[in-house]
Amino acid sequence: MPLSAAPTPSGRRLVTGLSTSLLLLAATGCGAGATAAGSSADPKPAPAAQRLDKVCPATVVVQADWEPEAEHGPLYNLVGPGYTVDTDKKRVTGPLVIGGKNTGVKIQIRAGGSAVGFQSPTSQMYIDQSITLGMVTTDSAIQAAGKQPVTAVTALMKKSPQVLMWDPKTHPDWQTIADIGKSSAKVVYRDGEIFAPMLVSKGIIKKSQLDGSYDSAPSRFVADPSIAQQGFATAEPYLYEHEIGAWKKPVKFQLLADVGYTVYPQALSVRTGALKKLGPCLKKLVPVIQQSAADFAAAPDTAVTLIDDIVKQYGTSWVYSKGTGQYAAKEMVKLGILGNEADGSIGGFDKKRVADSLKTFEPILTKGGVKLPAGLSADDLVTNEFIDTKIGMK
């Protein structure tokens, strides 16, 4: 089948097939349109270098690519006390703070997924130009470059948390994804995911192994542990061991980033045509986001608690426990999903990696019927212009 023109993040967990306790957790939100506030304490002003009120929009609007989760932690870490939650439109708005201090503008983070009819952030950014930043993974940016070009200005994560996972008891001989490819086991994934044909093109997995029937429910894996299945290092290992009652034991996995899926996931991007106009804002905003990412890596609890609060208030089919968020925040750092680049800074882009992604995915997308602009390069997709190389994780 052709690759989807508006891909959504793979393997995200909906209510289907999960335990009753998790369903109850997802149902505890306020009614449609209700508003709830966080602490009303008024944060002190940030230093002049971090004041955004004279260069940025009064409200910096960020369109997420999915429902609230710890992978978005560096952004939710910017939401200060006194925030409000729109449970109808699935948005949280509050003072944009850094280090607990007010930058002089607000931030609004809009949920993706069901909140926008599962449309891509790029499409939302072109429909609603009040959106300042959108979360766009490198392969999605390549795919959208012909009609909805975006330029990433800072990386939300260093590498993708996507994995292939398996049961170590059924497959004690599997240590890597390459080992899966030496077998005849089915690799169950969501149809349309670009990493699947990538694995075939690299000779790691056989085309005959691909099974695009994954629906996010754990029932298939539980019933047939002979398969390999897509997932996220930041979620499935915790869920299968602690929250999926029919399994309750460890799984093994390898990051797809280790075998060629070298994208920057959910990179914060602007419409390419708006880059120059937003430049003065981005010059100050991007280092603030970088610092927030470093702060979140060191102390994620505030952001994870906020994520837990708004997931409950939204009350959608998205299932995400606080335990999952706490696990994800730790694993992101442990596995280098959230980490510094080679120069010691956080949030920047290795353009060679971006060029490699372009080289890998361009032929796959073209074969799938996507028309890409001639001469598309890494410089069209990302920029380090606004990165402060002095800001990094300690």
Image: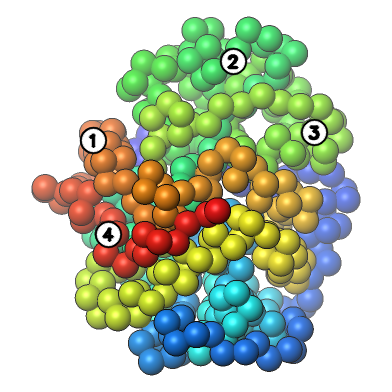
Circle 2 residue: 175
For the residues labelled 3 and 1, the Cα–Cα distance comes to 37 Å
Task: Tell me the SS state at disc 4.
Answer: loop
Type of amino acid under label 1: Lys
- Which callout, 3 or 4, points to the residue nearer the camera? 4
For the residues labelled 3 and 2, the Cα–Cα distance comes to 19 Å
Which is nearer the N-term, disc 3 or disc 1? 3
Which is nearer the N-term, disc 1 or disc 2? 2
- Which callout, 3 or 2, points to the residue nearer the camera? 2
Q: Nearer the viewer, residue 98 or 9?
A: 98
* Dot label at residue 383: 4
Q: Nearer the viewer, residue 188 or 393?
A: 393
Is residue 151 shown left or right of residue 99? left
Contact, mark 4 vs mark 1 (Cβ under 8 Å):
no
Circle 3 residue: 241
Q: Residue 155: x percent and y percent?
A: 42, 56
Contact, mark 2 vs mark 4 (Cβ under 8 Å):
no
Type of amino acid under label 4: Thr
Label 1 neighbour load within 10 Å: few <14, some 14-19, many 20+: few
For the residues labelled 2 and 4, the Cα–Cα distance comes to 36 Å
Circle 1 residue: 359
For the residues labelled 3 and 4, the Cα–Cα distance comes to 40 Å
Q: Quadrant of residue 93?
A: bottom right
Q: Nearer the viewer, residue 330 or 382?
A: 330
Is residue 46 shown left or right of residue 378? right
Type of amino acid under label 2: Gln
In the image, what residue occupies the spot 68% across and 59% down?
300
